Amino acid sequence: MSQATRILLSLLLGLIAGIATAALAPGAVEPTAAIAEPIGNAWLAGLQMTVIPLVTALLITGVAQTAEAASAGKVAARGIALFITGVFVTGAIAALVTPLILDLFPVPADAAAALRGALTGVAPVEPPPPLSKFFATLVPTNVVAAAASNALLSLIVFTLAFAFAITRLSAESRDLLVRFFAAIRDASLILVEWVLKLAPIGVFALAYVVGARAGAAALGAFVHYILVVAAIGVVVILLAYVLAGIGAGMSPLRFGRVILPAQAVAASTQSSLATLPAMIEAARALGIRTEVSGVTLPIGVAMFRATQPAMNVAIAVYIAYWFNVPIQPANLAAAVAVAALVSLGSVSLPAQLTFFASVAPPCVALGVPLAPLGLLIAVETIPDIFRTLGNVSMNLAATATLARHSDGIEPTLLETPS
């Protein structure tokens, strides 16, 4: 049984146990919750403690890898430019579409209220600052104080500036610092992996408290969340077909037929890296020259996660609706920006490993609590299928677009057997 399955089962068992306790022994709810809640909160704190070192290391190594890849040639540079544009575009689309979906299909009011009441450890959410103060807080006066106070936005601004400064150093100094932060990244991921080994205990404890206090309404709320976030993944997948039609000049139907085997591998493995051989074969069937696909597809797997900023912004917006946090345009734009930037530095690992570090920054930008992420990570298995499908589909569509505009060579869609 995979770790993701164990975490999901822990969530379901915790909810069922909590609901059963509330129904059969109401007087036992608070005494048992008083035991379970500190256990769940301690596990959640273990995840939160990895956010700052992991986000910092991912951004610095991501900028360094992007700069190095861009110097590899014209095709690589064009690919990186398109990939960077892509993550900002998908994030912006999610920022516009997710509120529309939630307005049409709102979070069940009773479930939202029950879940808010169940998560008693959530600190009060401060209202977003006015626009003038918001921009004033982006540049930290003391980066150590910013890290200590979890001021992720100002910390990210400093980290990006520092990362670009590293690219201007001599090769020896640059390699030294990049290796240093790569080691911090890898050590942080190992730490996250250790914390996730305890996830069945932590998630069970959190879910038990929610089930006992919120009742059966919690189950419906999680289903609603999965459908909304997965819908954003579907939007990104559809964008891939639009890009193939407009950017690469291909029939979206034919494009979809040819990439279907790669999508099947993506859905089964939930890994863009594991899907790379199937993507290369799909690119060949699309008539894309190896000189293009052999450069852009590996770079795309390493840095182009089109669904990550989109779905992470959707999660942050969903929590904002869940906790009745007002969304200001400046905060929403900041959430899109940080989600896109963090996605460029993420590594090709299972979503559970990087979920907290990649979702926390847009949540902080919107001013929403992070506590719900400890529960939402348990149901990430289903949205992660759509994440991988969107990443693979967009990577192939972008590669076809780049091939069409590289040295005047247009990819021709080869006929494939029906």
Image (cartoon, rainbow, N blue to C red):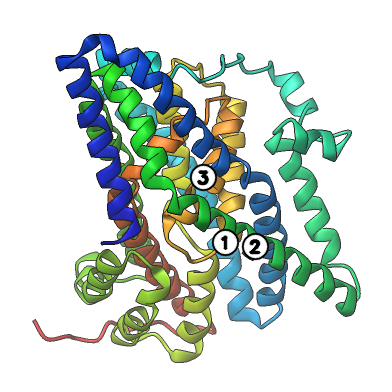
Viewer-proximal residue, 195 or 327? 195
Which quadrant holds the C terminus? Answer: bottom left
| Occupied quadrant, residue 147 | top right
Residue 389 position, x and y percent, is: 31, 61
The residue positioned 77% from the left and 50% from the top of the image is 159
| Occupied quadrant, residue 123 | top right
Front: mark 1 or 3: 1
Q: Secondary structure at mark 1?
A: helix
Q: Secondary structure at mark 3?
A: helix
**Label 2 close to label 1 by CB (< 8 Å):** yes
- Does residue 183 appear left or right of residue 20 in this picture? right
Looking at the picture, which amino acid does disc 2 mark? Ala
The residue positioned 28% from the left and 20% from the top of the image is 212
Q: CA distance from mark 2 to mark 1?
A: 5 Å
Q: CA distance from mark 1 to mark 3?
A: 14 Å
**Label 1 close to label 3 by CB (< 8 Å):** no
Which quadrant holds the N terminus? Answer: bottom left
Viewer-proximal residue, 16 or 129? 16
Looking at the picture, which amino acid does disc 1 mark? Ile
The residue positioned 50% from the left and 57% from the top of the image is 193
**Residue designated by label 3:** 356
The residue positioned 88% from the left and 33% from the top of the image is 141
Please determine whether, in this image, residue 322 is positioned above or below residue 241.
Answer: above
Crowdedness of circle 2 by 10 Å Cα count: few (<14), some, many (20+)?
A: some
Residue 257 position, x and y percent, is: 19, 72
> What numbered label is drawn on residue 190?
1
- Does residue 86 appear left or right of residue 341 in this picture? left
Can the viewer see residue 386? no
Mark 3 or mark 2, which has the lower sequence index? 2
Q: Secondary structure at mark 2?
A: helix
**Residue designated by label 2:** 187
Please determine whether, in this image, residue 91 is positioned above or below residue 73.
Answer: above
